[in-house]
Image: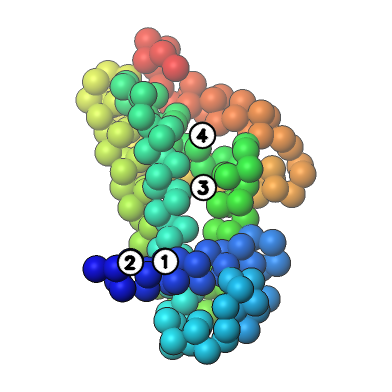
Amino acid sequence: MTGKVDHEKRRRQIAEALLRIADTEGLQSASMRAVATEAGVSLRLVQYYFTTKEGLLLDAFARLGTQLQARMQRWIGEARAPREVVTAILSCILPTDAESRRITRTYTAYYTLVLTDAEAIGKHGVSQPDLLESFLVKQLRAAREAGEIAPERDVEMAAAGLLAMVNGLGQSVLGGQRDGEAALAILTHHLDELFLPSAGG
């Protein structure tokens, strides 16, 4: 049992080193040797745990997803009404604090990578956003059934639009076009348009 724990600790140490490089320099700088240096281990050890760079990228990406999910769970924790859940999900994605800025920058590094690798898109870029969009659709559907959203609204289209908007807002915050407070105000404006006034906020 101790051996297994140590192996996982090593894998996490190496994967988190890659994520730090992705955050600060981009994945183009994340060679196996650079990851080894960042992790404070030998190149041979990195190659022992991850025989290919693709394997390391996938493992680190899964860990990044777990970090985002944990953040969402914290933000959703006290939400009760569907609008509160939707607001929490979308707000926690926006880069408004150190953790969310790091996560957004690192996801951007992965998106930049997959844009030049069509095969990698299926591995890196699709499954997690699809899961998030499906969860958001579920919350919006519950809100519509509860009378918080007009019955004629297409919640699938609304979910896709909200996520696309939040992703764009995130990039505009990272790029310095607006700050996090302004991005949240824009999000709130669009949620006010989607939810009926009686739904609250």
Q: Which of disc 2 and disc 4 is earlier in sequence?
A: 2
Amino acid tagged 4? Ser
* Residue 80 visible in this rendered orientation of the protein: yes
Residue 121 appears in view: no
The amino acid type, in three-letter code, at marker 3 is Ala
Q: Position of residue 140 (x, y in %)?
A: 32, 33
Residue named by callout 1? 9
Q: Are marks 2 and 3 in contact (CB under 8 Å)?
A: no
Task: Work out whether mark 3 precedes mark 4 in sequence or the reverse, and give the earlier one.
Answer: 4
Mark 4 or mark 2, whichever is nearer to me: 2
Q: Classify mark 4: residues with Cα within 10 Å, few (<14), some (14-19) or many (20+).
A: many
Crowd around label 3: few <14 · some 14–19 · many ≥20 (10 Å)? few
> Residue at horizontal 51%, vertical 42%?
93
Q: Residues within 10 Å of mark 2 (few under 14, many from 20)?
A: few
| Residue for badge 2 | 5
User: Secondary structure under badge 1?
Assistant: helix
Dot 2 falls on a residue whose secondary structure is: helix
The quarter of the image holding the N terminus is bottom left
Instruction: Please tell me in which quadrant of the rendered image residue 183 appears.
Output: top right
Secondary structure under tag 4 reads helix
Tag 2–tag 1 contact (CB < 8 Å): yes
- Discs 2/3, front: 2
Is 126 placed left or right of 40 in the picture? left
N-terminal of the pair, mark 4 or mark 1, is 1
Q: CA distance from mark 2 to mark 3?
A: 39 Å
Numbered mark located on residue 164 in the image: 3
Contact flag, marks 4 and 1 (Cβ < 8 Å): no
Question: Looking at the image, which is closer to me, 35 or 155?
Answer: 35
* Residue type indicated by callout 2: Val
Q: Alpha-carbon distance for marks 2 and 1?
A: 6 Å
- Give the residue pinned by disc 4: 91
